[in-house]
Image: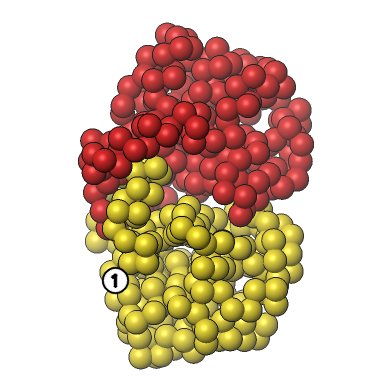
Chain colours: A red, B yellow
Amino acid sequence: MQIAVVLYDRFTALDAVGPYETLGRLPDSETVFVAERTGPVRTDTGNLALVADRTLADVPSPDIVVVPGGPGQLPHMENPALLDWLRAADATSTWTTSVCTGSLLLAAAGLLRGRRATCHWLALDHLRGFGAEPTGDRVVVDGKYVTAAGVSSGIDMGLTLLGTIAGDEHAQAVQLLTEYDPQPPYDAGSPEKAPAHLVAEFRTASRFSLT
Amino acid sequence: MQIAVVLYDRFTALDAVGPYETLGRLPDSETVFVAERTGPVRTDTGNLALVADRTLADVPSPDIVVVPGGPGQLPHMENPALLDWLRAADATSTWTTSVCTGSLLLAAAGLLRGRRATCHWLALDHLRGFGAEPTGDRVVVDGKYVTAAGVSSGIDMGLTLLGTIAGDEHAQAVQLLTEYDPQPPYDAGSPEKAPAHLVAEFRTASRFSLT
């Protein structure tokens, strides 16, 4: 199987690396990082670049498409080169997936119409404008479309899909090798659990920071 | 504060990206990815490269040192260029940290002698050979040395150190923005929790795959 992870300027690194490190351990698979142009692609902080080894045109029909999110997703919601590639790749993909605001790119390409889907909590409602049905679940599977919530949720999505494709035992082996036994020092990872004033502050600023 | 994340051939991507995405959100900080040479550095799978923007020599005295692990760590345990840099950087650092087998590089540089420390579960016992005291905890703080267990534990380490430096509320805000509310589909992330036969199989093969 060929897994294509799509990069674009100002994506969020962990959105891409979470699925890469889990789903990318699928047996007999090849993971390729793709972008409009090959070469380094800067993340949202500007402090890191991941390398796109192939262009979108080089990889026309991956079996699995992974679209990360990040503040850089906004201009690409009207980028015909990327949206056309997503539609074409989706026409032959076995799974089309996203992390964080990557689902807004799938939605903008018209791929989530009538589908249940998720997104970063701050941008979740935007899915509705594209005919998708937003849900607050961390990983949402609707047919071949697998969307994950914000940033770190791509790890859970990757393991979930890995288990579906390669079986529970293989996914457990990858969980064990990546020692994914999370012990966050706080319980503030969702808007239901975090201090209410933090949630309110981010909601006020969200349209500028994330979408 | 300057945060230096050290890259080397065949490191594990999530080891580096977990702390980058959490600790790297420290206010008034700069995160720099460093390596012996600037340019793309390939990860352990060969399918991804992260870019080192600066050489080790360019960044002689970071406030925080982050050393990821990965199978590529083994040859560097006898690489004087890297070990000398680690010793020199540690002489002035505020925090010296590692993820996964990155702690073996700190140990090989002589920095963990007499210290409690952790490592990937498959390589934990190797710490003892360098005078460190291995512990199975996910994040271990001993003075200014903060070591994390395997791969994904760098996220917990990053949030823990972020909270120590910038305060609980800032760390909670970063946890909320990265939506780090883990919901793994299995409970197999440590040798105590995973199916026993998987643990046994990896222990048999471990000296070839990880250290």
Q: Position of residue A201 (x, y in %)?
A: 34, 38
Q: Position of residue A115 (x, y in %)?
A: 41, 13
Q: Secondary structure at mark 1?
A: loop
Which residue is rendered at x = 62% and y = 82% of the image? B85
Which residue is rendered at x = 62% and y = 53% of the image? A48
Q: Going by the image, does B51 lie left or right of B98?
A: right
The residue under label 1 is B136
Query: Which chain does the numbered disc 1 sit on?
Result: B
- Out of B47 and A172, give the one closest to the viewer: B47
Q: In the image, is residue A177 above or below residue A94?
A: below
Q: Tell me the quarter of the picture where residue B165 sits.
A: bottom left
Which residue is rendered at x = 47% and y = 86% of the image? B111
Residue A36 visible in this rendered orientation of the protein: yes
- Out of B33 and B172, give the one closest to the viewer: B172
Residue A183 visible in this rendered orientation of the protein: no
Q: Going by the image, does B40 lie left or right of A146?
A: right
Q: Position of residue B162 (x, y in %)?
A: 38, 61
Q: In the image, is residue B8 above or below residue B152?
A: below
